[in-house]
């Protein structure tokens, strides 16, 4: 039995690229014996040990006994925290955080250390050429490190007959002088100065020849998106493509098991164990708690106020008061860019009317948080992503009449216990379709719904010339680690899906025949039409 346990311990740590000496192995065996771990639970318990050890900044390949003891103490503390959590009542208010895109800390990917490093310098709106390059490199390297971890792309350490024919990930610099060889590249799809489609990585670029390409992989392929391209390098210095696909999406749990100690949102990190306990407690104690999400709340359309009144009336009549109501722009049905002073005044008056309507429902305003997310046509201090909140000039009445009102950036995030909810209001679908490259001329409805955003781990997988972003704040557009929920409020038809453990939905435009919106239940990790 002891030999069986030792083999299990060694195998689990080997999976995380760590080797155990006699002292470390004996220590883990003693811990398992001390806590009377049954044979059926040995692998799970050692897995927790290995994951926590892997998170340590000073973790070496050869397992250190001192670090192992520190990890054990940490797991003990987490267990105590979990017991304390079970003993106390859950307070949703203290675990609900609205996160501004401009307040999220910047974590850059370090090639040298193979992990994320927090940037401590000042971030500016203007940015620089260096930060623009760094933002693009972060996108590439974050995807690359997860691809290399994927079982389909990491070669076996054991010799095999197929090893010689194995296609592993290469760099563009490795193509030179190797015409006739087969390569697999990961990079950005861009057009060069001659208008030719290329794939570009951190070492260079190569022109793509799509004449022999069969059926591409799922999803949309746009200029500025990352793609895996396989093909043969030719004497004409082009890559004759035989296959192209989206990078595989790494699920949230896998990424969190590696980087769970990193506080990407700036509101404190939670461990996987804490997340698991929160999930269970929310399901047990907060099963009747809901969030509402509305998009295209056109305040210049009288039907909008009729629909909102109907929604509030139903909430009060059925004692169904949501914890959060997120209203996404556009808050006007037409652009005010060329509007006159009267148009701007009406825009403000419409917000004042909305404030009066919401304030007339004290049963709702006593407990509900209202979040306002600007759309592309709304008046903010900047039209570049991430967008600043609505100008305070237009929101003074809302602030004075609604106790729990938040004017958020676009995008913004909600941290609710261990859940991360991303809200993004942009007509991304139309932009993606206008900027597809010649990889897939015919796109089906299912591929439109997925539109590759989760595979790209980024809300805007386009070049900055297509949709400008602030390079110093590009990290606020990342979707890595994968969030729990992503609300892609778009003019496109409403839909919902769950992909790699991330629930994605589009609430659709509010104004219409049925005043369309979506409700999200944190206990079920699912959404429904309102």
Image: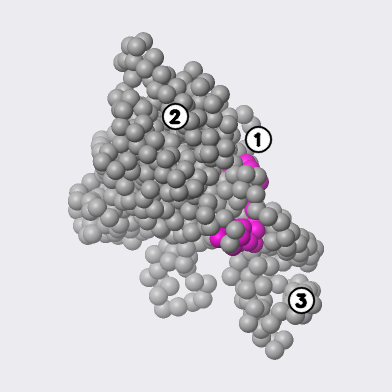
Mark 2, mark 1: which one is toward the viewer?
Answer: 2
Query: How much space separates mark 2 and mark 1, taking CA atoms?
Result: 44 Å
Question: Where, by quadrant of the figure, is residue 72 drawn?
Answer: bottom right
Q: Is residue 292 left or right of residue 56?
A: left
Query: How much space separates mark 2 and mark 3, taking CA atoms?
Result: 59 Å
Say which residue appears at 31% left-offset and 47% top-offset: 494
| Stretch in magenta | 264-283
Nearest to N terminus: mark 2 or mark 3: 3
Element marked by disc 1: loop
Give the crowd class for mark 2: few <14, some 14-19, many >=20 residues within 10 Å.
Answer: some
Q: Which mark is residue 357?
A: 2
Element marked by disc 2: helix
- In the picture shown, does residue 15 fall above or below 362? below
Query: How much space separates mark 1 and mark 3, taking CA atoms?
Result: 42 Å
Task: Report the front residue among 502 and 369.
Answer: 369
Q: Which mark is residue 120?
A: 1
Mark 1, mark 3: which one is toward the viewer?
Answer: 3
Dominant secondary structure of the magenta stretch?
Answer: helix
Return the residue found at the far top.
341
Say which residue appears at 58% left-offset and 62% top-offset: 284
Mark 2, mark 3: which one is toward the viewer?
Answer: 2
Q: Position of residue 99 (x, y in %)?
A: 56, 38
Residue ID for mark 3: 35
- In the picture shown, does residue 44 fall above or below 503? below
Q: Position of residue 455 (x, y in %)?
A: 40, 53
């Amino acid at each position: 039995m002891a030999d069986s346990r030792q083999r299990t311990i060694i195998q689990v740590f080997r999976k995380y690229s760590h080797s155990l000496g006699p002292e470390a192995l004996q220590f883990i065996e003693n811990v398992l014996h001390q806590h009377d771990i049954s044979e059926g639970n040995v692998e799970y318990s050692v897995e927790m040990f290995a994951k926590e050890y892997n998170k340590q900044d000073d973790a070496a390949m050869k397992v250190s006994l001192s670090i192992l003891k520190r990890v054990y103490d940490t797991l003990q503390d987490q267990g105590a925290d979990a017991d304390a959590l079970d003993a106390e009542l859950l307070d949703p208010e203290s675990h609900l955080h609205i996160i501004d895109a401009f307040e999220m800390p910047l974590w850059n990917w370090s090639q040298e250390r193979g992990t994320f490093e927090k940037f401590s310098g000042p971030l500016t709106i203007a940015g620089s050429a260096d930060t623009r390059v760094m933002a693009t490199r972060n996108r590439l390297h974050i995807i690359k490190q997860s691809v290399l971890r994927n079982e389909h792309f990491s070669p076996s350490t054991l010799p095999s007959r197929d090893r010689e024919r194995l296609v592993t990930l290469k760099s563009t610099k490795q193509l030179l002088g190797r015409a006739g060889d087969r390569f697999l590249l990961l990079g950005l799809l861009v057009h060069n100065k001659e208008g030719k489609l290329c794939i570009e990585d951190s070492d260079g670029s190569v022109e793509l020849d799509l004449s022999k390409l069969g059926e591409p992989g799922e999803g949309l392929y746009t200029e500025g998106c990352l793609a895996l391209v396989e093909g043969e390098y030719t004497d004409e210095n082009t890559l004759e493509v035989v296959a192209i696909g989206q990078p595989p999406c790494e699920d949230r749990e896998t990424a969190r098991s590696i980087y769970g100690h990193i506080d990407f949102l700036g509101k404190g990190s939670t461990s996987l164990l804490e997340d698991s306990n929160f999930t269970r407690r929310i399901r047990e104690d907060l099963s009747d708690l809901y969030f509402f999400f509305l998009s295209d709340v056109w305040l210049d359309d009288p039907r909008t106020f009729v629909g909102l009144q109907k929604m509030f009336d139903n909430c009060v009549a059925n004692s169904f008061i949501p914890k959060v109501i997120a209203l996404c722009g556009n808050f006007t049905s037409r652009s005010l860019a060329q509007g006159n002073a009267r148009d701007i005044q009406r825009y403000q008056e419409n917000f004042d009317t909305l404030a009066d309507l919401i304030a007339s429902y004290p049963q709702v305003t006593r407990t509900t948080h209202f979040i306002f997310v600007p759309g592309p046509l709304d008046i903010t201090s900047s039209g570049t992503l991430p967008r600043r909140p609505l100008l305070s000039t237009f929101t003074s009445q809302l602030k004075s009449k609604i106790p729990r009102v938040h004017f958020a950036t676009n995008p913004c995030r909600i941290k609710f216990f261990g859940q991360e909810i991303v809200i993004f209001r942009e007509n991304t679908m139309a932009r993606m379709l206008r900027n597809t490259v010649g990889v897939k001329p015919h796109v089906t409805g299912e591929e439109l719904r997925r539109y590759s955003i989760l595979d790209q781990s980024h809300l805007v997988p386009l070049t900055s010339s297509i949709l400008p972003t602030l390079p110093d704040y590009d990290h606020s557009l990342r979707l890595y680690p994968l969030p729990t929920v992503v609300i892609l409020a778009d003019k496109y038809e409403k839909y919902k899906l769950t992909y790699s453990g991330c629930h994605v939905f589009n609430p659709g435009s509010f104004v219409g025949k049925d005043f369309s919106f979506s409700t999200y239940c944190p206990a079920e990790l699912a959404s429904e039409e309102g």
